[in-house]
Image (cartoon, rainbow, N blue to C red):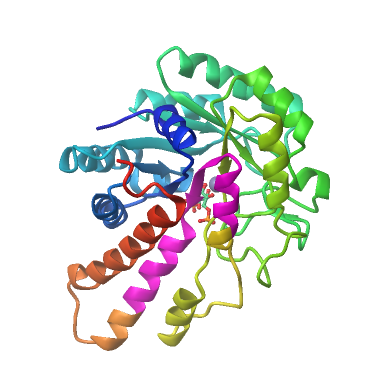
Amino acid sequence: ALVSLRQLLDHAAENGYGLPAFNVNNLEQVTAIMEAAHEADSPVIMQASAGARKYAGEAFLRHLISAAVEAYPHIPVVMHQDHGQSPAVCMAAIKSGFTSVMMDGSLEADGKTVASYEYNVDVSKEVVKFSHSIGVTVEAELGVLGSLETMQGDKEDGHGADGKMTREQLLTDVEQAADFVKATQCDALAIAIGTSHGAYKFSKKPTGDILAIDRIKEIHARIPNTHLVMHGSSSVPQELLAEIREFGGDMKETYGVPVEEIQEGIKNGVRKINIDTDIRLAMTGAIRRYFIENPSKFDPRDYLKPAREAAKKVCIARFQAFGSAGQA
Ligand code: G3H
Ligand code: 13P
Ligand code: ZN
């Protein structure tokens, strides 16, 4: 059944686990996630980005997720809008049936100018106002996602802050977080702790200097009743990179967020963990392998099946590691 994000996150908090939130763009990703959830017996958060809406269109995304709900009636499913750039975008998503929205007011509506704190409070508050009255959950974001190695805002695919950032901007401030939640009444808060979107997060396995898990502990201690969200949480498994390289792909050396660090976050109030890149890598590795090993095949179902299997494996591993397996 379709459920609200708030319901799932409250249950996760009560029972001390975290939920991966997977980005979806097409049928193969949706079915991979649902097969994984069915096998692991986990609730599901599927989210659509602006890029997904551009690729598939809101109607296809909505119906794909509705189809998932119909095919797996026993699995709780959240249909979430990822990174809404304005209250208008959030409103449109709600009208189209999304059960929760993210108002990302950390950047202005252009998606690259760092917003003022006041702007962020204003737009987030506005979205909470029209969402809560109809039972829709709101995720807001405070702090700018980006790398503490390079001090750059994240913009691997052209969205993310422009120019050099300061350490202050790249780490969510504890007192400001408390003030923000009080002012906006958001249900969940995405925080900046040194992760960034995409495959190229860290040039080496991250240490406490460049991935500030401690900041999560401080924020959670200050606002224990707010569900925390980690964006840019793909682990970028080295074996997936190796497979892509083995079959002709060009992936530079790179590291993601180690699963153990996410587990540490979950112990400290992280309830929603956003993952897109790991599924992209898994599908790409499987397709590359298939093409090389089966040069005469041309039916898309032939190569999308192993891609779906590979995505499913990643999803099951995350459901198990974050503790949502068995909670559906
Ligand atoms: O927000 C980042 C997600 O990975 C979505 O990426 O905008 O390319 O769909 P996208
Ligand atoms: P990754 O690029 O690390 O998978 O992060 C996805 C994300 O945060 C979507 O909002
Ligand atoms: Zn994100």
Furthest toward the top, the residue is 133
Closest to the observer, 54 or 271: 271
> Residue 59: x percent and y percent?
29, 37
What is the quadrant of residue 100 in the picture?
top left
> Residue 16: x percent and y percent?
49, 40
Closest to the observer, 186 or 38: 38
> Residue 119: x percent and y percent?
71, 25
Query: Relative to residue 216, is residue 243 drawn left or right?
Result: left
Query: Relative to residue 157, is residue 82 drawn left or right?
Result: left
Q: Is residue 81 above or below residue 231?
A: above
* Residue 279 colored in magenta in the image: yes
Residue lying at 27% horizontally and 87% vertically, measured from the top left:
293
What is the quadrant of residue 169 in the picture?
top right
Q: Is residue 47 above or below residue 264?
A: above
What is the quadrant of residue 202 in the picture?
bottom right
Q: Is residue 203 visible?
A: yes
Chief secondary structure of the magenta span? helix
**On-image quarter of the C terminus:** top left
